[in-house]
Amino acid sequence: MSGKGFNLSGGGGSEGESADGLSMLDVLTLPEDQQQAINWMIRQGKVSFTQVVTHMGEDEKAARTMLDTLMGKGFVRETPVDGKPHYHTHLASKKKRELPSKIWKALE
């Protein structure tokens, strides 16, 4: 992994940015190393800063940059655990699909 951290949009654009969190489509459109980081965080649940640094294999500055980027995009949230910050992914809610009213008539 590079010392640049993770940049979701690649250029600060609005693609992937959502107040609703990270969708699975967003994960699939990320570069492979970013997909791996997000997938790791999803599997782990809440992770400490030290765990992020260890997982990345980079220095604390790179880990902080990655977390700040992900939090700025709304994909990661910080939560205190025993007075220390921990991080977890914020996935978008699944959108509920409404069935057309005609379908009920067709089923009668």
Image: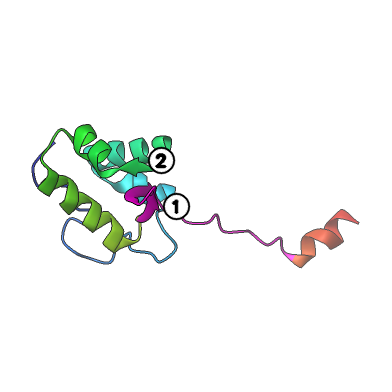
Could you tell me which residue is drawn at 11 percent across and 48 percent down? 61
Q: Which mark is residue 91?
A: 1
Display coloring: rainbow
Q: Nearer the viewer, residue 9 or 90?
A: 90
Query: Which residue type carries mark 1?
Result: Leu
Span highlighted in magenta in the image: 77-100
Could you tell me which residue is drawn at 31 percent across and 47 percent down? 29
Mark 1, other Cα within 10 Å: few <14 / some 14–19 / many ≥20: some
- Give the residue pinned by disc 2: 42
Query: x, y percentage for residue 97?
Result: 63, 59
Q: Residue 79 carries which label?
A: none
Up-down: is 47 above or below 9?
above
Answer with mark 2 or mark 1, whichever residue precedes in sequence. 2
In the image, is residue 34 part of the stretch drawn in magenta? no
Q: Are marks 2 and 1 in contact (CB under 8 Å)?
A: yes
Could you tell me which residue is drawn at 25 percent across and 44 percent down? 49
| Quadrant of the image containing the C terminus | bottom right
Q: Is mark 2 on a helix, strand or loop?
A: helix
Outermost residue, right direction?
108
Query: x, y percentage for residue 43?
Result: 42, 35
In the image, is residue 90 part of the stretch drawn in magenta? yes
Query: x, y percentage for residue 86?
Result: 34, 48
Mark 2, other Cα within 10 Å: few <14 / some 14–19 / many ≥20: some
Query: Which residue type carries mark 2?
Result: Ile
Give the CA distance from mark 2 to mark 1: 9 Å
Up-down: is 42 above or below 15?
above
Q: Is mark 1 on a helix, strand or loop?
A: loop
Q: Is residue 87 visible?
A: yes
Left or right position of 10 against 45 = left
Query: x, y percentage for residue 18?
Result: 38, 64
| Quadrant of the image containing the N terminus | top left
**Residue 107 in which image quadrant:** bottom right
